Image: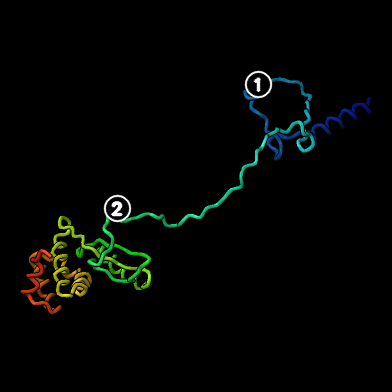
Amino acid sequence: MKILIVIVSLTALLLSSCSPKAGAPGTNTPLPAATAASLPTESPMATVTAEPDLATDSTTLPTIAFTAGAPATCQLSPVIPSIDTFSEFNVPSSSETDRAYGAATPKITILSYCNFQNPACKSLVFNLADLQQQYQEEVRIVLRQYPQPDVYDKSLLAAYAVEAAGLENRYWQMHNLLYSRQSEWTSLTPINFAEWLVEQAGTLDISRAQWEANVASEV
């Protein structure tokens, strides 16, 4: 009897030591009573079903038919699209009548539409000049008048002024003067700006009479 009791006690001790403890790492935490009641009741005996070995059992692999096609070919495409920008946007191409400077046979021609009163145009024109200096044999800059009198009240008069100076072969001198001293005249009234232009024309060796005639000219 004593031997039987000892065996039963040892068996209970071993079972308790091998049973997982609630919340212990690597074990399953007991489910709440409501969750456990919803689980199906089955026999505690586990049924193990052997999975097929895909590496050795070819009957489990799908069969797919492949048809070899022609080898792929590669075709080089230019980075810059080969389009005619001038015709697409209805922009007149560069001509001898344009005010331009730079390479005689350029790889790239930049058309700049600006007005002298716009601060952004001042930055653009100076940056284009720096760009052309870096690529003297590749780049040509074309400057075209684009006054906006409804936004810039003196831009049209400034355009007339630089073209009037051009009739006396002083286009670039007046062009550089208007941009470099833009901060001096943008705050002036149109009347005061006209007087300021007459003074500047005198510094470019253009007589007042000739200046006024050129400004009023239809050319």
In x, y percent, where is residue 112? 27, 62
Find residue 49 and report its horizontal and vertical position in percent: 77, 28
Give the residue drawn at x 16%, y 62%: 155
Residue sitting at x 73%, y 33%: 61
Above/below status of 164 relative to 82? below
For label 1, the crowd category at 10 Å Cα-Cα, with few meaning under 14, some 14 to 19 and many 20 or more, is few
Q: Quarter of the image for the N terminus: give it.
A: top right
For residue 211, side relative to residue 42 (left or right):
left
Question: For the residue marked with disc 1, what is the amino acid?
Answer: Ala
Which residue was labeled with disc 1? 37
**Image coords of residue 31 (percent x, y):** 65, 28
Q: Is residue 47 above or below residue 200?
A: above
For marks 1 and 2, give the one nearer the viewer. 2
Q: Which mark is residue 89?
A: 2
97 or 154: nearer the viewer: 97
Relative to 52, does residue 91 appear above or below in the rendering? below
**Image position of 24 (left or right of 11):** left
Kind of residue indicated by mark 2:
Phe
